[in-house]
């Protein structure tokens, strides 16, 4: 009996740290972190994944002199999990941000809908893009990549060996800039077409001042925006490949940055 207690006392710190890192990943990874998956389900998923992965991952005998060291290690593992998922989530949300820009250009920025993934109101076009990207992500088995990440990160960064380096912080900032660049690239076709529509409306108002241009502007911009969105669906696979590759590169680079010496 005492041997069992000693064994549990030996492996429990590593088990706790494994569970904490998986919890951090559950908080920030795309789809898994959405509020439509309740906190209770994410905790259960993290606990189940801990029991499944713990016998498979490399385990080191972690010894802590006192509770303060254990608490610091817990916070470090939580931050590692959050950083691993946050960059991926930021890139994943590029389509939603692009939809917000397109919706504003179309003139329907005030027409918001309740988003079950964020429990807040977002523009209609953002909701459309988000539903399409989630559906496509699941259709190509992208969720398998997320679950693979839950295991691969322990191979690269064994429990208790991660380092919160400045490189990881710079990588996260760079990921944000890449996400905004992707956003404007995705929204560029609609922005250009709607800008041409605004220019033509301005010329029309100048040539025909007696025409009530405001009665034509909004329906015309909405119709043009919808046509561009339909056409852009043909380019969606190519655009999503960029996002998917960016997510994989971000995960690999982040794991390398957080890898201990």
Image: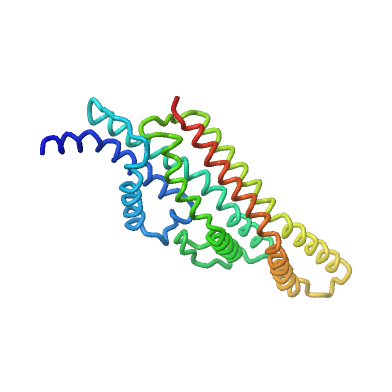
Residue 141 vs 8, above or below: the answer is: below
- Tell me how the rendering is colored: rainbow
In this rendering, the answer to whether 181 lies above or below 10 is below
Q: Residue furthest left?
A: 1
| 119 and 204: which is toward the camera | 119
In-image side of 123 versus 231 (left or right): left
Q: Is residue 182 above or below residue 99?
A: above
Task: Tell whether 194 sits left or right of 109.
Answer: right
Horizontal relation, residue 91 to residue 119: left or right: right
> Which residue is outermost to the right?
207
Q: Quadrant of residue 104?
A: bottom right
Residue shown at the point (35%, 56%) measured from the top left: 39
Residue at the (45%, 50%) spot, across then down: 147
Q: Nearer the viewer, residue 57 or 99?
A: 57
Q: Viewer-proximal residue, 253 or 74?
A: 253
Name the quarter where the N terminus is drawn.
Answer: top left
The structure residue drawn at horizontal position 22% and vertical position 27%, both measured from the top left corner, is 66
Residue 223: x, y in percent?
72, 71
Q: Position of residue 253 (x, y in %)?
A: 54, 36
The image position of residue 55, as x and y in percent, is 32, 42
Name the one closer to the observer, 160 or 217.
Answer: 160
The tally of labels here is 0
Report the quarter where the C terminus lies.
Answer: top left
């Amino acid at each position: 009996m005492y041997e069992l207690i000693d064994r549990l006392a030996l492996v429990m710190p590593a088990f706790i740290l494994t569970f904490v890192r998986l919890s951090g990943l559950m908080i920030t990874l795309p789809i898994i972190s959405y509020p439509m998956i309740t906190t209770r389900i994410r905790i259960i998923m993290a606990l189940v994944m801990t029991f499944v992965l713990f016998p498979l991952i490399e385990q080191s005998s972690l010894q802590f002199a006192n509770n303060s060291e254990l608490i610091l290690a817990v916070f470090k593992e939580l931050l590692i999990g959050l950083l691993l998922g946050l960059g991926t989530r930021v890139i994943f949300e590029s389509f939603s941000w692009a939809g917000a820009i397109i919706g504003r250009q179309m003139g329907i920025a005030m027409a918001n809908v309740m988003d079950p993934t964020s429990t807040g109101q977002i523009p209609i076009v953002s909701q459309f893009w988000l539903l399409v990207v989630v559906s496509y992500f699941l259709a190509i088995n992208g969720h398998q990549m997320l679950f693979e990440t839950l295991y691969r990160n322990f191979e690269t960064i064994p429990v208790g060996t991660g380092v919160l380096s400045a490189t990881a912080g710079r990588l996260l900032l760079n990921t944000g800039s890449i996400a905004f660049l992707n956003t404007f690239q995705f929204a560029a076709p609609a922005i250009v077409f709607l800008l041409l529509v605004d220019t033509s409306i301005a010329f029309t108002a100048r040539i025909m001042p007696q025409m009530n241009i405001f009665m034509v502007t909004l329906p015309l911009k909405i119709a043009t925006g919808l046509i561009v969105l339909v056409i852009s669906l043909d380019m969606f696979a190519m655009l999503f490949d960029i996002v998917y590759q960016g997510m994989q590169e971000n995960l690999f680079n982040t794991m390398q940055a957080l890898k201990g010496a």
